[in-house]
Image (tube, rainbow, N blue to C red):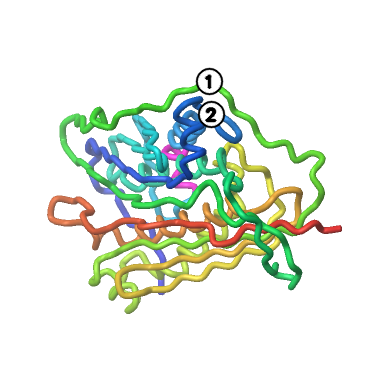
Amino acid sequence: MSVKMIDITSKEPVYREAVARGFLKVDEDTMSDLINNGVSGLGNAASIAKITAINAVKTAWRYIPLLHPIPITYVEARVHYEKDGIEMAVLARTRAQTGVEMDALFGLFTGLLAAWNTIKGCSRTCTPEWVTNFMGKKVQTCGSSRVDGMFDIRVVNKVKSEDSVGLGIEDFVDNANGPPIVTMFDVTTEPTYYGEASAKGFIRLREETVELIRQGKVEKGDVITVSKTAAIVAAKKAWEILPLVHLNYLTYVNVDARVIEDGVEIAVDTRNVSNTGSAMEAVFATGVALLTVWDMVKKYEKDEKGQYPHTVIREIKVLKALKTPAV
């Protein structure tokens, strides 16, 4: 089966705008720190998320294989703290031959992941557990994490117009404040670990779209192969786009993709040998794979108004994150 980027050479550029929203579920202790003090973990999660999102919107084409590189003319990112997590909205604008919704979605996903990386760790009430690593050894890990995962990543509105448009996100209240604290965790004196992580995510699609994927009739090509390849490449490049993620020596990446009744499920396993783990790489790879699926089938997911009423990345979660001393 061929794989192709859609030819937009002869299309006329018009004004385009899209708004994406999503939610990062966080434990109440961490959210209390963020709401009351503005910082937790490695610093100001909201500021890191916003800056990362803006940069990600402009570079989405580097990670989603069949996405066109378009001139992004405006990006706005807002964060709203709630007692059980972080809600984020990203607005993107362009004047181009194709839409900007995938760029907005990638910015949103990456911004939320940057916030996740800032505050990750064991919850204060966790009960350590013993689990078996990939080498068959027993390893102690925390029983519960500060972050439960990402949920309900969607396009809430998009516009295409001959005239300048202005959806805006003024109705999204940004209540995140705090001091300008940003710290990359110091792993200089950390020992070398065998790290391993597993992440899983799901995108809901129309039944008709799912059937096209099964039959190999998607115009852009083999959805499963392209999304799995995108995930592997993304895992190795997470450090480029996530400000506080270390350059990591990944030694293994495996991607499974299952087409099920109402969508596509992606699972990513990573392993590494370094002085940190690889959970963020696994999550980033999972999200990029899901967004690649969305990008390849978006033609079939839009309604008559060009919106995505059915399509949503329902969740992205870490299933396992272990570090075993190498010596």
Question: Residue lying furthest top in this view?
Answer: 179
User: Is the magenta region chiefly helix, strand or loop?
Assistant: helix
Q: Residue at x 34, y 77 (%)?
A: 214
Q: Residue at x 82, y 40 (%)?
A: 189
Q: Is residue 59 visible?
A: no
Location of residue 96 in the rendering, given as x and y in whole percent from the top left corner: 29, 39
The disc labelled 1 sits on which kind of residue? Answer: Pro
Q: Which residue is mark 2?
A: 39
Quadrant in which residue 210 is drawn: bottom left
Image: 300 above or below 114 = below
Given residues 186 and 232, the one toward you in this image is 186
Residue 200 magenta: no
Given residues 196 and 217, the one toward you in this image is 196
Which region of the structure is painted magenta? 56-62
Q: Secondary structure at mark 1?
A: loop
Location of residue 102 in the rendering, given as x and y in whole percent from the top left corner: 35, 48
Image: 273 above or below 55 = below
Q: Residue at x 28, y 47 (%)?
A: 155
